[in-house]
Image (tube, rainbow, N blue to C red):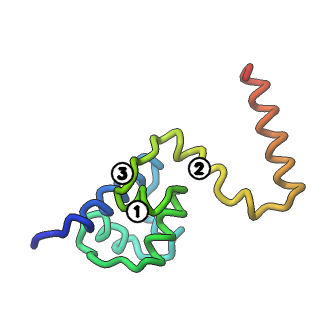
Amino acid sequence: MQQTRGAMEIGDRLFSLRTKAGQSLKQVADDVGVSKAHVWELEKGHSKNPSFDLVQRLAAHFGVSLDVLTGATEEPDAEAMQVARINRGLDALSERDRRVVEQMIETLKQADGG
């Protein structure tokens, strides 16, 4: 069975992003609301037409744009992905909680001499 170039690119990117994030198929599947088998099929290029909603959820899960997931732009390195994961969801926190997180970051930077 021949795979389309677009399906392979998304599958390759998905595998690469998942590997860089150090996540299992199950972790990704649970977070985006699909089965582990479905994530595996996407990575292998067997699922040719993932829904736009699913592609958006995958991009959000990894903290990347749709362009990164589809191969239109470069993938971030593991460190950039980690920073994106840390930042993801901060906007959902209250202003007070964001200030607490900001203070924690400043305290850690000072402890590291940064």
The mark lying in front, picked from 1 and 3, is: 3
Contact, mark 1 vs mark 3 (Cβ under 8 Å): no
Relative placement, left or right, of 96 versus 87 is: right
CA gap, disc 1 to disc 3?
A: 12 Å
For the residues labelled 3 and 2, the Cα–Cα distance comes to 16 Å
Among the two numbered marks 2 and 1 on one chain, the one whose residue lies closer to the N terminus: 1
Q: Residues within 10 Å of mark 2 (few under 14, many from 20)?
A: some
Amino acid type shown at disc 1: Leu
Dot label at residue 84: 2
Task: Give the residue displayed 42% in from the left and 56% down from the top.
Answer: 68
Q: Amino acid at mark 3?
A: Ser
Q: Tell me the crowding category of disc 1: few under 14, some 14 to 19, or many 20 or more residues within 10 angstroms, Cα based.
A: some
> Toward which corner of the image does residue 6 lie, by quadrant?
bottom left
Disc 1 element: helix
Percent x, y for residue 2?
Answer: 11, 70
Answer above or below: position of 74 versus 110. below
The number of numbered discs placed on residues in the rendered structure image is 3
- For the C terminus, give its image quadrant: top right
Farthest residue in the right direction? 96
The residue lying toward the viewer, choosing from 27 and 4, is: 4
**SS at circle 2:** helix
From the image, state whether disc 2 or disc 1 is nearer to you. Answer: 2
* First along the sequence among labels 3 and 2: 3
Relative horizontal placement of residue 37, taking residue 34 as reference (left or right):
left
Q: Which residue position is annotated with label 1?
A: 25
The crowd level at tag 3 (other Cα within 10 Å; few <14, some 14-19, many 20+) is some
Q: How far from the left and from the top, in percent, is residue 77?
A: 45, 41
Q: Residue at coordinates 80% horizontally, 34% vertically from top-left?
A: 106
Residue drawn 81% across the image and 43% down it: 102
**Residue holding disc 3:** 16
**Amino acid on which disc 2 is placed:** Ala
Find residue 105 and report its image quarter.
top right
